[in-house]
Amino acid sequence: MSPLIAITGANGQLGSELRILSSSYPDLKFIFLTRNELSLENENSIEDFFQKFKPQFLINCAAYTAVDKAETERELSFLINGKAAGDLALSCKKNKCKLVHISTDYVFNGNSSVPYKENDPVDPVNAYGASKLEGENRIIAFAPDSIIIRTAWVYSAYGHNFVKTMLRLMKERKEINVVNDQTGSPTWAQDLAKVILEIIQSKKWIGGIYHYSNNGRITWYDFAKSIAELTGTSCKVNPIPSSAYPTPAKRPAFSLMDTNLIRTTFQIDIPDWKESLVKCLAQIKKYES
Protein backbone atom coordinates (compact mmCIF):
# COMPACT_ATOMS: atom_id res chain seq x y z
CA MET A 1 0.00 0.00 0.00
CA SER A 2 1.29 3.47 -0.90
CA PRO A 3 2.39 5.51 2.13
CA LEU A 4 0.36 8.66 2.82
CA ILE A 5 2.35 11.89 3.13
CA ALA A 6 0.66 14.86 4.81
CA ILE A 7 2.05 18.31 3.98
CA THR A 8 1.28 21.37 6.08
CA GLY A 9 1.76 24.89 4.74
CA ALA A 10 0.50 23.66 1.36
CA ASN A 11 0.19 27.15 -0.15
CA GLY A 12 3.69 28.30 0.81
CA GLN A 13 6.78 28.16 -1.41
CA LEU A 14 7.91 24.67 -0.41
CA GLY A 15 4.35 23.33 -0.15
CA SER A 16 3.59 24.58 -3.67
CA GLU A 17 6.71 22.90 -5.08
CA LEU A 18 5.85 19.63 -3.30
CA ARG A 19 2.34 19.76 -4.76
CA ILE A 20 3.71 20.12 -8.31
CA LEU A 21 6.31 17.39 -7.81
CA SER A 22 3.79 14.98 -6.25
CA SER A 23 2.56 13.86 -9.68
CA SER A 24 6.07 12.53 -10.42
CA TYR A 25 5.83 10.14 -7.45
CA PRO A 26 2.99 7.72 -8.32
CA ASP A 27 4.11 5.33 -5.54
CA LEU A 28 3.30 7.93 -2.89
CA LYS A 29 -0.06 9.36 -1.78
CA PHE A 30 -0.34 12.98 -0.69
CA ILE A 31 -2.67 15.16 1.32
CA PHE A 32 -2.03 18.91 1.22
CA LEU A 33 -3.14 20.98 4.19
CA THR A 34 -3.67 24.73 4.33
CA ARG A 35 -4.32 26.73 7.49
CA ASN A 36 -8.07 26.22 6.97
CA GLU A 37 -7.77 22.44 6.78
CA LEU A 38 -5.50 22.02 9.79
CA SER A 39 -5.30 24.67 12.49
CA LEU A 40 -1.84 24.41 14.04
CA GLU A 41 -2.90 26.70 16.87
CA ASN A 42 -5.31 23.97 18.02
CA GLU A 43 -3.68 20.79 19.37
CA ASN A 44 -7.03 18.94 19.33
CA SER A 45 -7.37 19.64 15.62
CA ILE A 46 -3.87 18.13 15.08
CA GLU A 47 -4.74 14.94 16.96
CA ASP A 48 -8.13 14.67 15.19
CA PHE A 49 -6.36 14.89 11.84
CA PHE A 50 -3.98 12.04 12.75
CA GLN A 51 -6.84 9.86 13.96
CA LYS A 52 -8.79 10.44 10.76
CA PHE A 53 -6.08 10.16 8.08
CA LYS A 54 -3.27 8.16 9.78
CA PRO A 55 -0.40 9.46 7.58
CA GLN A 56 2.91 7.60 7.55
CA PHE A 57 4.88 10.81 6.92
CA LEU A 58 4.35 14.46 7.75
CA ILE A 59 6.30 17.26 6.04
CA ASN A 60 5.84 20.38 8.14
CA CYS A 61 6.27 23.38 5.83
CA ALA A 62 3.92 25.55 7.89
CA ALA A 63 5.61 28.40 9.73
CA TYR A 64 5.30 31.99 10.85
CA THR A 65 7.86 33.53 8.46
CA ALA A 66 7.37 37.32 8.81
CA VAL A 67 10.82 37.94 10.29
CA ASP A 68 10.37 41.65 11.09
CA LYS A 69 6.78 41.27 12.29
CA ALA A 70 7.84 38.53 14.68
CA GLU A 71 9.57 41.18 16.81
CA THR A 72 6.14 42.59 17.75
CA GLU A 73 4.11 39.37 17.24
CA ARG A 74 6.47 37.27 19.34
CA GLU A 75 3.67 35.31 21.01
CA LEU A 76 2.13 34.27 17.69
CA SER A 77 5.48 33.33 16.14
CA PHE A 78 6.31 31.13 19.17
CA LEU A 79 2.85 29.57 19.07
CA ILE A 80 3.21 28.47 15.43
CA ASN A 81 6.97 27.89 15.13
CA GLY A 82 7.48 26.58 18.65
CA LYS A 83 4.45 25.06 20.37
CA ALA A 84 2.67 23.81 17.22
CA ALA A 85 5.87 22.16 15.95
CA GLY A 86 6.05 20.31 19.27
CA ASP A 87 2.37 19.33 19.10
CA LEU A 88 2.91 17.90 15.60
CA ALA A 89 5.96 15.96 16.81
CA LEU A 90 3.98 14.59 19.76
CA SER A 91 1.17 13.39 17.47
CA CYS A 92 3.72 11.91 15.04
CA LYS A 93 5.36 9.94 17.87
CA LYS A 94 1.99 8.75 19.19
CA ASN A 95 0.75 7.70 15.74
CA LYS A 96 4.01 6.18 14.43
CA CYS A 97 4.36 8.85 11.75
CA LYS A 98 7.76 10.07 10.55
CA LEU A 99 8.24 13.85 10.66
CA VAL A 100 10.26 16.08 8.32
CA HIS A 101 10.37 19.60 9.75
CA ILE A 102 11.78 22.71 8.06
CA SER A 103 13.91 25.05 10.16
CA THR A 104 16.22 27.96 9.42
CA ASP A 105 19.78 29.33 9.33
CA TYR A 106 18.46 32.06 11.67
CA VAL A 107 19.07 29.80 14.67
CA PHE A 108 22.73 30.97 14.43
CA ASN A 109 24.06 34.39 15.43
CA GLY A 110 26.00 34.99 12.21
CA ASN A 111 29.37 35.61 13.87
CA SER A 112 31.10 32.66 12.20
CA SER A 113 33.55 32.91 9.31
CA VAL A 114 33.25 29.24 8.29
CA PRO A 115 30.05 27.41 7.19
CA TYR A 116 27.89 26.31 10.12
CA LYS A 117 27.73 22.61 10.92
CA GLU A 118 24.63 20.96 12.42
CA ASN A 119 26.16 20.65 15.90
CA ASP A 120 27.56 24.19 16.11
CA PRO A 121 26.23 26.29 19.03
CA VAL A 122 22.91 28.03 18.33
CA ASP A 123 22.26 31.63 19.35
CA PRO A 124 19.45 33.37 17.42
CA VAL A 125 19.63 37.15 17.08
CA ASN A 126 15.91 37.75 16.45
CA ALA A 127 12.47 36.52 17.61
CA TYR A 128 11.85 34.52 14.44
CA GLY A 129 15.10 32.57 14.88
CA ALA A 130 14.32 32.02 18.57
CA SER A 131 10.83 30.71 17.76
CA LYS A 132 12.22 28.27 15.17
CA LEU A 133 14.84 27.07 17.66
CA GLU A 134 12.07 26.47 20.19
CA GLY A 135 10.36 24.29 17.56
CA GLU A 136 13.55 22.30 16.97
CA ASN A 137 14.01 21.71 20.71
CA ARG A 138 10.43 20.55 21.18
CA ILE A 139 10.65 18.17 18.21
CA ILE A 140 13.90 16.65 19.48
CA ALA A 141 12.34 16.21 22.94
CA PHE A 142 9.07 14.65 21.71
CA ALA A 143 10.08 12.78 18.53
CA PRO A 144 13.90 12.45 18.39
CA ASP A 145 13.71 10.27 15.27
CA SER A 146 12.44 13.26 13.24
CA ILE A 147 14.41 14.82 10.38
CA ILE A 148 14.90 18.58 10.83
CA ILE A 149 16.22 20.42 7.77
CA ARG A 150 17.61 23.91 8.30
CA THR A 151 17.50 25.92 5.10
CA ALA A 152 18.18 29.52 4.07
CA TRP A 153 17.21 32.30 1.67
CA VAL A 154 14.35 30.28 0.15
CA TYR A 155 12.88 31.49 -3.14
CA SER A 156 10.61 30.10 -5.86
CA ALA A 157 8.07 31.10 -8.50
CA TYR A 158 5.42 31.13 -5.74
CA GLY A 159 4.61 33.37 -2.80
CA HIS A 160 6.69 36.30 -1.57
CA ASN A 161 10.47 36.03 -1.80
CA PHE A 162 13.63 37.96 -2.64
CA VAL A 163 13.77 36.95 -6.31
CA LYS A 164 10.19 38.01 -7.05
CA THR A 165 10.63 41.25 -5.09
CA MET A 166 13.80 42.09 -7.05
CA LEU A 167 12.07 41.38 -10.39
CA ARG A 168 9.24 43.73 -9.43
CA LEU A 169 11.55 46.53 -8.20
CA MET A 170 13.78 46.23 -11.26
CA LYS A 171 10.75 46.90 -13.45
CA GLU A 172 9.59 49.84 -11.33
CA ARG A 173 12.89 51.64 -10.62
CA LYS A 174 16.02 52.86 -12.39
CA GLU A 175 18.23 51.79 -9.49
CA ILE A 176 17.96 49.81 -6.27
CA ASN A 177 20.13 49.38 -3.17
CA VAL A 178 20.86 45.90 -1.80
CA VAL A 179 22.87 44.91 1.28
CA ASN A 180 26.34 43.55 0.57
CA ASP A 181 27.48 42.49 4.05
CA GLN A 182 25.21 39.50 4.72
CA THR A 183 26.68 36.26 3.40
CA GLY A 184 24.93 32.95 2.72
CA SER A 185 23.60 30.78 -0.06
CA PRO A 186 20.09 30.78 -1.53
CA THR A 187 17.79 27.76 -1.75
CA TRP A 188 15.45 27.11 -4.65
CA ALA A 189 12.39 25.57 -3.01
CA GLN A 190 12.04 23.04 -5.85
CA ASP A 191 15.52 21.61 -5.12
CA LEU A 192 14.66 21.23 -1.43
CA ALA A 193 11.27 19.65 -2.24
CA LYS A 194 12.99 17.04 -4.45
CA VAL A 195 15.47 16.17 -1.71
CA ILE A 196 12.70 15.65 0.86
CA LEU A 197 10.74 13.34 -1.45
CA GLU A 198 13.89 11.42 -2.41
CA ILE A 199 14.66 10.86 1.29
CA ILE A 200 11.13 9.54 1.90
CA GLN A 201 11.16 7.31 -1.17
CA SER A 202 14.65 5.95 -0.43
CA LYS A 203 13.31 4.30 2.76
CA LYS A 204 16.63 5.27 4.35
CA TRP A 205 15.43 7.14 7.41
CA ILE A 206 18.14 8.59 9.64
CA GLY A 207 16.72 11.12 12.09
CA GLY A 208 18.58 14.26 13.12
CA ILE A 209 19.32 17.83 12.09
CA TYR A 210 20.57 18.52 8.55
CA HIS A 211 21.56 21.65 6.61
CA TYR A 212 20.40 22.27 3.06
CA SER A 213 20.91 25.18 0.67
CA ASN A 214 22.25 25.40 -2.86
CA ASN A 215 26.02 25.33 -3.36
CA GLY A 216 27.97 28.58 -3.32
CA ARG A 217 28.68 31.64 -1.21
CA ILE A 218 27.20 35.05 -2.02
CA THR A 219 25.72 38.21 -0.51
CA TRP A 220 22.22 39.56 -1.15
CA TYR A 221 23.84 42.13 -3.46
CA ASP A 222 25.50 39.33 -5.48
CA PHE A 223 22.13 37.61 -5.69
CA ALA A 224 20.36 40.76 -6.92
CA LYS A 225 23.17 41.53 -9.39
CA SER A 226 22.82 38.04 -10.90
CA ILE A 227 19.04 38.44 -11.20
CA ALA A 228 19.64 41.75 -13.03
CA GLU A 229 22.24 40.20 -15.38
CA LEU A 230 20.18 37.11 -16.15
CA THR A 231 17.05 39.13 -16.95
CA GLY A 232 18.85 41.88 -18.90
CA THR A 233 17.29 44.72 -16.92
CA SER A 234 18.60 48.27 -17.21
CA CYS A 235 18.03 48.83 -13.48
CA LYS A 236 21.28 49.60 -11.63
CA VAL A 237 22.00 47.58 -8.47
CA ASN A 238 24.02 49.38 -5.78
CA PRO A 239 25.76 47.63 -2.85
CA ILE A 240 25.02 49.11 0.60
CA PRO A 241 25.87 48.10 4.20
CA SER A 242 23.12 46.68 6.46
CA SER A 243 23.45 49.84 8.57
CA ALA A 244 22.00 51.82 5.63
CA TYR A 245 18.92 49.57 5.55
CA PRO A 246 17.76 49.16 9.17
CA THR A 247 15.06 46.53 9.84
CA PRO A 248 13.07 45.77 13.03
CA ALA A 249 14.71 42.32 13.25
CA LYS A 250 18.48 41.93 13.22
CA ARG A 251 19.82 39.60 10.50
CA PRO A 252 22.82 37.29 10.94
CA ALA A 253 25.77 38.69 8.95
CA PHE A 254 26.97 35.19 8.04
CA SER A 255 24.59 32.28 7.58
CA LEU A 256 26.40 29.96 5.21
CA MET A 257 25.70 26.34 6.18
CA ASP A 258 27.81 23.21 5.68
CA THR A 259 25.63 20.79 3.68
CA ASN A 260 28.02 17.84 3.74
CA LEU A 261 25.97 15.77 6.21
CA ILE A 262 22.74 15.65 4.15
CA ARG A 263 24.76 15.09 0.98
CA THR A 264 26.68 12.08 2.30
CA THR A 265 23.92 10.55 4.46
CA PHE A 266 21.35 10.42 1.67
CA GLN A 267 23.70 10.44 -1.37
CA ILE A 268 22.18 13.54 -2.93
CA ASP A 269 23.56 16.05 -5.41
CA ILE A 270 23.16 19.71 -4.54
CA PRO A 271 23.03 22.12 -7.50
CA ASP A 272 24.96 25.38 -7.64
CA TRP A 273 22.85 28.41 -6.65
CA LYS A 274 23.21 30.11 -10.04
CA GLU A 275 22.18 27.02 -11.97
CA SER A 276 18.98 26.85 -9.91
CA LEU A 277 18.34 30.59 -10.20
CA VAL A 278 18.45 30.30 -14.02
CA LYS A 279 15.83 27.52 -13.88
CA CYS A 280 13.57 29.43 -11.49
CA LEU A 281 13.72 32.63 -13.57
CA ALA A 282 12.73 30.60 -16.66
CA GLN A 283 9.81 29.15 -14.69
CA ILE A 284 8.65 32.61 -13.55
CA LYS A 285 8.89 33.92 -17.13
CA LYS A 286 6.84 30.98 -18.39
CA TYR A 287 4.11 31.60 -15.78
CA GLU A 288 3.97 35.29 -16.63
CA SER A 289 3.69 34.76 -20.42
Image: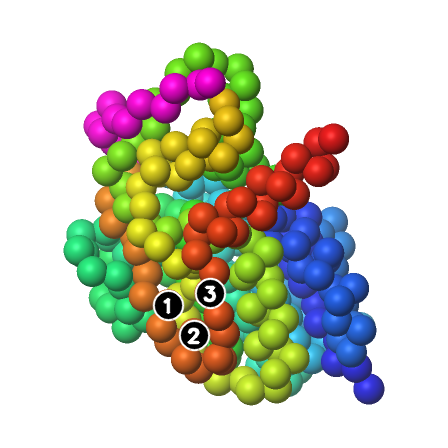
Q: Looking at the rendered structure, which numbered label has been put on residue 259?
A: 1
Q: Secondary structure beneath disc 2?
A: helix
Q: Position of residue 126 (x, y in %)?
A: 32, 45
Q: Is residue 38 above or below residue 67?
A: below
Circle 1 packing at 10 Å, graded few (<14), some (14-19), many (20+), is: many
Rounded to the nearest angstrom, the CA distance separating label 1 from label 2 is 6 Å
Q: Which residue is mark 2?
A: 263
Taking the spot 17% from the left edge, 55% from the top edge, the residue there is 113
Q: Where is residue 114, by image quadrant?
A: bottom left
Q: Secondary structure beneath disc 3?
A: loop
Q: Which residue is mark 3?
A: 270
Foreground: 258 or 100? 258
Rounded to the nearest angstrom, the CA distance separating label 3 from label 1 is 9 Å
Left or right, 111 with reference to 278: left
Q: Position of residue 98 (x, y in %)?
A: 60, 79
Q: Where is residue 157, by image quadrant?
A: top right
Circle 3 packing at 10 Å, graded few (<14), some (14-19), many (20+), is: some
Left or right, 102 with reference to 286: left
Do residues under tags 3 and 2 come within 8 Å of each other at their CB atoms? yes
- Over which residues does the magenta segment extend? 234-249
Magenta region includes residue 239: yes
Do residues under tags 3 and 1 come within 8 Å of each other at their CB atoms? yes
Do residues under tags 1 and 2 come within 8 Å of each other at their CB atoms? yes
